[in-house]
């Protein structure tokens, strides 16, 4: 790992967040979980759909695992959308959930920007190339003929989707027409409409957009999005849904029931392969399984997910994938990697004593209230002490740690 990515990785740890990239450089002890997720992702090809749940306490490494998995998904040429359940992205309003999914679509080649405009451009460019390939050096189609041929290809490509979602299909046709006529206002309007934004009625009427994203159309919109992703050559769509436990804070039981019913619907549709080449990865805390406002209050969902866990013989193939706090060995392995990155980024006058990290971990465990090593809290604390030790060589890491927990 080069110096600059290592700097940003350490900065993310200081901020108590998960690095957007580079997590595999410090990932330790999650190989079996990543292997299982990778196997499931491979299995959604050929028009299958699957799901998995990651369950762990706050700070246990759920988001870290999902970011490491995202890097694997990108390597497999999958499209990824990562959404966080919140007031702005509620699961009891599926249309708002869909809007968040499509707004956060990212592509392997450009993961830092919205992938929807690139998907549309790639789809149309491939059709344009088909038109060009049909021509010859001696007989080249006129612009009018090219437009007509492209329009036919667009219509043929979308013909099978007409019954699935007329609104989305018409939007793709409108995008082609806007691109051909270089109508930037129409291009932005189509992209906005696909994202679920409100488009002025007059503009919708001019370019031929029909309907809008609502609860009834959101499911079919997702299916057409999957068609678009597959048609331009991507492996699949991975939808990562984080902080599902936020549903426990919904104001009314009826809202929670609708949200849980939407989840149940997604799981059932996956079992029928109705979301072809799509993998759903849900993340939440154990309260979802224990709290009366969680899955126990919705037996239809609990029955689909609940299983008997044997921690000594972990079955990673079950629907629920559990993430536990680190043991001392795992914490030591990660601490070594973080320390090496810290040395790479900053100029250390002298290295730490050989056994200091192991002493640090034991001291942290003895001093902490719950006697557990949660990755987020532990790594944030470790990097803080490494920073001070590097800047002040006389700084005593162990005594400072003990004092910190006594306060």
Image (cartoon, rainbow, N blue to C red):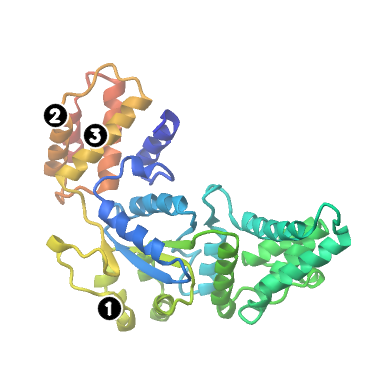
Q: Is mark 1 on a helix, strand or loop?
A: helix
Quarter of the picture containing the C terminus is: top left
> In the image as oriented, which residue stretches furthest toward the top?
349
Closer mark to the observer between disc 3 and disc 1:
3
Task: Name the residue tied to disc 2.
Answer: 355
Task: Name the residue tied to disc 1.
Answer: 296
Please report the residue visible at 14 percent of the width from the left and 35 percent of the height from the top: 358
Q: Relative to residue 105, is residue 110 depicted above or below?
A: above
Q: Which of 347 and 147 is in front in this view?
A: 147
Q: Is mark 2 on a helix, strand or loop?
A: loop
Q: Which comes sooner in the sequence, label 3 or label 2?
A: 3
Q: Where is residue 126 in the image (x, y as percent from the top left)?
A: 68, 58
Please report the residue visible at 61 percent of the width from the left and 79 percent of the height from the top: 164
- Classify residue 204 as left or right of residue 19: right
Q: Which comes sooner in the sequence, label 3 or label 1?
A: 1
The alpha-carbon separation of the residues under discs 1 and 2 comes to 47 Å
Quarter of the picture containing the N terminus is: top left
Please report the residue visible at 26 percent of the width from the left and 55 percent of the height from the top: 32
Q: Where is residue 176 in the image (x, y as percent from the top left)?
A: 75, 63
Task: Name the residue tied to disc 3.
Answer: 336
Q: Residues within 10 Å of mark 3 (few under 14, many from 20)?
A: some
Closer mark to the observer between disc 1 and disc 2:
2
Q: How crowded is mark 2: few (under 14 residues within 10 Å), some or many (20 or more)?
A: few
Image quadrant of residue 73? bottom left
Q: Which comes sooner in the sequence, label 1 or label 2?
A: 1
């Amino acid at each position: 790992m080069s110096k600059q990515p290592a700097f940003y990785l350490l900065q993310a740890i200081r901020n108590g967040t998960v690095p957007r990239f580079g997590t595999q450089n410090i990932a330790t002890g999650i190989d079996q979980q990543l292997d299982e997720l990778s196997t499931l992702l491979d299995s959604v090809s050929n028009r299958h759909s699957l799901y998995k749940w990651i369950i762990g306490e706050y700070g246990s490494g759920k988001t870290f695992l999902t970011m490491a998995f995202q890097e694997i998904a990108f390597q497999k040429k999958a499209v990824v959308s990562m959404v966080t359940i919140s007031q702005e992205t509620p699961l009891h309003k599926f249309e708002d959930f869909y809007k968040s999914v499509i707004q956060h679509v990212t592509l392997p080649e450009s993961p830092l920007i919205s992938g929807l405009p690139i998907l549309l451009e790639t789809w149309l460019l491939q059709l344009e190339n088909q038109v060009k390939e049909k021509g010859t050096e001696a007989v080249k189609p006129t612009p009018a003929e090219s437009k007509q041929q492209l329009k036919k290809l667009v219509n043929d490509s979308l013909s099978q989707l007409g019954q699935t979602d007329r609104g989305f299909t018409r939007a793709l046709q409108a995008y082609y027409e806007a691109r051909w006529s270089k109508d930037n206002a129409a291009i932005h309007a189509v992209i906005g409409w696909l994202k679920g934004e409100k488009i002025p009625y007059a503009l919708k009427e001019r370019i031929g957009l029909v309907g809008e994203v609502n609860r009834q159309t959101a499911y079919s919109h997702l299916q057409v999005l999957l068609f678009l992703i597959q048609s331009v050559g991507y492996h699949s769509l991975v939808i990562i849904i984080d902080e599902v436990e936020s549903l426990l804070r919904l104001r009314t039981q009826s809202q929670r029931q609708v949200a849980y019913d939407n989840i149940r619907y997604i799981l059932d549709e996956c079992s029928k392969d109705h979301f072809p080449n799509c993998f759903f990865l849900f993340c939440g805390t154990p309260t979802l399984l224990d709290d009366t406002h969680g899955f126990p209050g919705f037996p239809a969902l609990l029955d689909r997910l609940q299983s008997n866990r044997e921690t000594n013989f972990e079955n990673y193939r079950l629907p629920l994938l559990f993430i536990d706090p680190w043991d001392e060995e795992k914490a030591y392995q990660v601490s070594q990697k973080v320390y090496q990155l810290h040395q790479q980024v900053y100029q250390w006058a002298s290295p730490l004593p050989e056994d200091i990290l192991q002493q640090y971990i034991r001291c942290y465990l003895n001093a902490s209230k719950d006697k557990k090593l949660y990755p987020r809290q532990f790594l944030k604390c470790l990097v803080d002490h490494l920073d001070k030790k590097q800047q002040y060589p006389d700084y005593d890491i162990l005594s400072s740690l003990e004092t910190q927990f006594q306060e």
